[in-house]
């Protein structure tokens, strides 16, 4: 069966709680993007068990839509792409280099997936991304226009052109860090189109390579509708309130870690997953 045959738009929209229109317009793009971001958590529990997650539509439906699971960037943005295409949008998958915590965009490979979305009647395409597991992630899509700041769902973003040596313009998504009072890079990308086959290779490498950060320890993120953000990085559990107040604590044992993952992140821990090693 093809991805379109395996994909169930009604079940997906019910999972994210979207009750609005199903037209390929900006209001629908923004609404579906936000609903997805606030409903499906970021998690890497499959790679922690030693397996790259499947990107097939039927498997994504079983895991993230019908099951109590989230996923990482390839899963999230594949699921969103299938939804947007079913709604009538023209979508181009893109790939970028994570710059958060990096010295330069060239110091890391292209391992992050995002989407370029064409919206009828709009003068420019939009950057959509529901799979960046960080507090600086987009909650709403932003126009692919440099030099303009955008605020959405309590977060501020901008796209900045970077110096480059290739034929395509290089962009960086930046998020405003309220605690530091400055802009922080999230990832850099060009508008070169990528295919599902490209992401199968990226997914296998990121999901199985022993040096990948996603195979070494649990990494979970969840944003709540009130702006409250949860993060689990190994044993460190961090809560960030909408006003920027941050609390951190170390989880002490496997039972506590499973309870936090189940109750706070809303994720069913898969068989074989050991959260604290």
Image: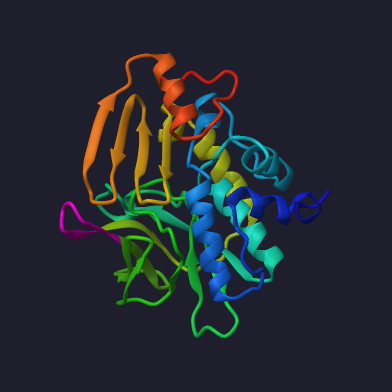
Q: Is residue 158 above or below residue 236?
A: below
- Where residue 157 appears, x then y in whole percent? 32, 65
Q: Residue at x 43, y 33 (%)?
A: 264
**Total count of labels:** 0
Residue 33 shown left or right of residue 252 in the figure: right
Q: Is residue 207 magenta?
A: no
Q: Residue furthest left?
A: 181
Q: Quadrant of residue 27?
A: bottom right
Q: Residue at x 56, y 28 (%)?
A: 268
Q: Nearer the viewer, residue 41 or 18?
A: 18
Segment tinted magenta in the rendering = 175-183
Residue 257 shown left or right of residue 125 in the figure: left
- Where residue 267 appears, x then y in whole percent? 53, 32
Residue 212 visible within the image:
no
Residue 140 shown left or right of residue 36 in the figure: left
Q: Nearer the viewer, residue 87 or 46?
A: 87
Q: Nearer the viewer, residue 222 or 71?
A: 222
- Where residue 83 appears, x then y in whole percent? 65, 59
Q: Residue at x 50, y 85 (%)?
A: 123
Q: Quadrant of residue 221?
A: top left
Q: Residue at x 56, y 42 (%)?
A: 203
Residue 63 visible within the image:
yes
Which quadrant of the figure contains the C terminus?
A: top left
Residue 90 shown left or right of residue 253 in the figure: right
Q: Is residue 56 above or below residue 166?
A: above
Q: Residue furthest right?
A: 1
Q: Is residue 176 magenta?
A: yes
């Amino acid at each position: 069966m093809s991805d379109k045959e395996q994909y169930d738009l009604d079940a997906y929209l019910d999972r994210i709680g979207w009750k609005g229109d199903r037209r390929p317009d900006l209001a629908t793009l923004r609404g579906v993007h936000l609903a997805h971001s606030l409903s499906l958590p970021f998690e890497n529990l499959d790679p922690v068990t030693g397996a790259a997650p499947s990107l097939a539509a039927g498997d994504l439906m079983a895991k993230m839509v019908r099951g109590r699971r989230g996923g990482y960037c390839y899963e999230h943005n594949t699921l969103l792409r299938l939804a947007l295409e079913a709604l009538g949008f023209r979508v181009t998958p893109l790939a970028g280099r994570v710059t958060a915590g990096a010295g330069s965009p060239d110091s890391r490979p292209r391992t992050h997936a995002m989407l370029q979305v064409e919206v009828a009647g709009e003068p420019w395409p939009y950057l959509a991304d529901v799979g960046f597991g960080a507090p600086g992630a987009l909650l709403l899509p932003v126009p692919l226009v440099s030099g303009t700041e955008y605020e959405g769902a309590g977060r501020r973003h901008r796209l900045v052109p970077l110096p480059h040596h290739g034929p395509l313009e290089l962009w960086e998504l930046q998020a405003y860090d309220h605690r530091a009072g400055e802009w922080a890079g999230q990832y850099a990308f060009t508008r070169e189109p990528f295919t599902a086959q490209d992401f199968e290779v990226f997914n296998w490498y990121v999901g199985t390579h022993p040096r990948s950060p996603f195979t070494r320890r649990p990494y979970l993120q969840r944003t709540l509708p009130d702006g409250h953000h949860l993060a689990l990085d190994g044993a460190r559990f961090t809560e960030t309130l909408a006003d920027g107040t941050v609390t951190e604590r170390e989880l002490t044992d496997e039972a506590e870690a499973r309870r936090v993952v189940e109750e706070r992140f809303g994720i069913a821990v898969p068989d074989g997953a050991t959260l604290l090693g």
